[in-house]
Amino acid sequence: MKIAICPGSFDPVTLGHLDIIERATELFDKVIVLVMSNSAKHSAFTVEERMELLKKCTDHTKVEIDTYNGLLVNYAKNKGAVAIVKGLRAVSDFDYEFQQALINKSLYPRIETVFLTAKGENMFLSSSMVKEVCRLDGDISPFVPAEIVNDINLRCKGDK
Ligand code: ADP
């Protein structure tokens, strides 16, 4: 069984993330969406809340939601994963992602990083953009799954 991991902060999950996760299920037998806590980013949702939001909008037998706060390649090794799947939005993502892929490969040579290009309409979509639009009272429904619009509004609307 070919297992892939889609790691990220998912704070919160957007339609851009979901597109990458769904496309990964076409390529692999199982996709583990791994919520990582990123101490460098101030998060709006706790790791547990982010996992709940993901569960609300990923109803797919091939998708599993998990969390880990150690080294990604150690998690991959333990799960027997063959690939890390990442979405690439623009050239701006590339430098950082390329560096990560090279480091992961040198730490664990059996892992491949697979880059999927973002859909045109998701090119400028990020979790931080969603939070900012919401904070300023904008409509976030074009950017996130319908199932979680209310949860995000409750947390971020008018958040000053
Ligand atoms: P963000 O950069 O929005 O904080 P994450 O750290 O949660 O997102 O990213 C997890 C993964 O999802 C990364 O591989 C990232 O490149 C990808 N991703 C994020 N937003 C999009 C998008 N709009 N389209 C495609 N991939 C995306």
Image: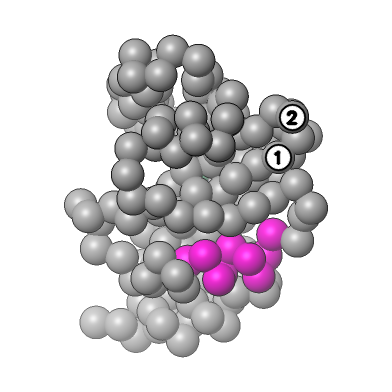
The location of residue 40, given as percent across then percent down, is: 20, 52
Task: Please report the residue visible at 50 percent of the width from the left and 49 percent of the height from the top.
Answer: 34
Magenta extent: 50-58
Q: Which residue bears the numbered disc 1?
A: 30
**Chief SS of the magenta region:** helix
Point out the image quarter for the N terminus.
Answer: top right
Confirm whether residue 19 shows in the render: no
Q: How many marks?
A: 2
Confirm whether residue 100 shows in the render: yes
The amino acid beneath tag 1 is Lys
Task: Please report the residue visible at 33 percent of the width from the left and 37 percent of the height from the top.
Answer: 71
Q: Under tag 2, what secondary structure?
A: loop
Point out the image quarter for the C terminus.
Answer: bottom left
Horizontal placement of 69 versus 118: left or right?
A: left
The location of residue 135, given as percent across then percent down, is: 36, 77
The disc placed on residue 53 is none
Q: Under tag 1, what secondary structure?
A: strand
Task: Please report the residue visible at 34 percent of the width from the left and 85 percent of the height from the top.
Answer: 158
Magenta region includes residue 111: no
Task: Please report the residue visible at 48 percent of the width from the left and 82 percent of the height from the top.
Answer: 153
The mark that comes first in sequence, 1 or 2, is 2
Q: Nearer the viewer, residue 103 or 16?
A: 103
Q: Which residue bears the numbered disc 2?
A: 1
In this view, 12 is above or below 116: below
Q: CA distance from mark 1 to mark 2?
A: 8 Å
Magenta region includes residue 55: yes
| Quarter residue 28 falls in | top right
Asked whether disc 1 touches disc 2, contact meaning CB atoms under 8 Å apart, the reply is: yes
Horizontal placement of 155 versus 21: left or right?
A: left
In this view, 129 is above or below 52: above
Dot 1, how many residues are within 10 Å of its Cα: few (below 14), some (14-19), or many (20+)? many
The amino acid beneath tag 2 is Met
